[in-house]
């Protein structure tokens, strides 16, 4: 999955900030797949997928802009789903 546009940007969810320079992120996809590694996620009344199998640590310099925020409760739910995925 490549990004779009000249800079190949890609939407992602920042799951955890690691220190002051790194971030643990999960890429997002508009394609809904019912396979392992994709977690359904509703965001701004749109159904999207969290691509947990592509989760990675990146430099915070690569994060270009914050588009929105999710609640702490929702972030805890996402983290639980990620833990379930990695305990398979």
Image (cartoon, grey):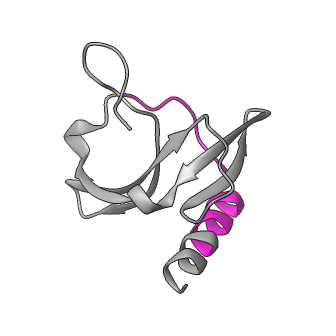
Name the image quarter holding the C terminus.
Answer: bottom right
Near-viewer residue (53 or 17): 53
Residue 32 position, x and y percent, is 67, 43
Question: Would you identify the image quadrant in which residue 76 lies?
Answer: bottom right
Question: Which residue appears at 49% of the width and 79% of the height?
Answer: 86
Residue 36 position, x and y percent, is 58, 66
Q: Count all numbered tags in the image, as a single digit.
A: 0
Near-viewer residue (71 or 40): 40
Residue 7 position, x and y percent, is 25, 19
Q: Residue furthest toward the bottom?
A: 87
Residue 65 position, x and y percent, is 38, 28
Q: Is residue 72 magenta?
A: yes
Question: Which residue appears at 34% of the width and 33% of the height?
Answer: 2
Question: Would you identify the image quadrant in which residue 35 lies?
Answer: bottom right
Q: Residue furthest toward the right?
A: 45
Q: Is residue 69 magenta?
A: yes
Q: Is residue 58 left or right of residue 77?
A: left
Q: Is residue 55 left or right of residue 47?
A: left
Q: Is residue 32 left or right of residue 3?
A: right
Question: Would you identify the image quadrant in which residue 3 lies?
Answer: top left
Q: Is residue 43 left or right of residue 5?
A: right
Which segment is the magenta one? 65-80
| Above or below for 83 versus 73 | below
Question: Which residue appears at 39% of the width and 59% of the height?
Answer: 55
Name the image quarter holding the N terminus.
Answer: top left
């Amino acid at each position: 999955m490549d990004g779009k546009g000249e800079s190949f940007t890609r939407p992602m969810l920042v799951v955890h900030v690691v220190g002051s320079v790194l971030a643990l992120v999960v890429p997002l996809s508009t394609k809904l797949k019912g396979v392992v590694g994709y977690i359904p996620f509703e965001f701004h009344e749109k159904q999207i997928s969290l691509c947990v199998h592509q989760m990675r640590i990146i430099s915070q310099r690569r994060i270009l802009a914050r588009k929105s925020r999710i609640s702490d409760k929702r972030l805890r739910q996402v983290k639980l789903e990620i833990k379930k995925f990695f305990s398979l």
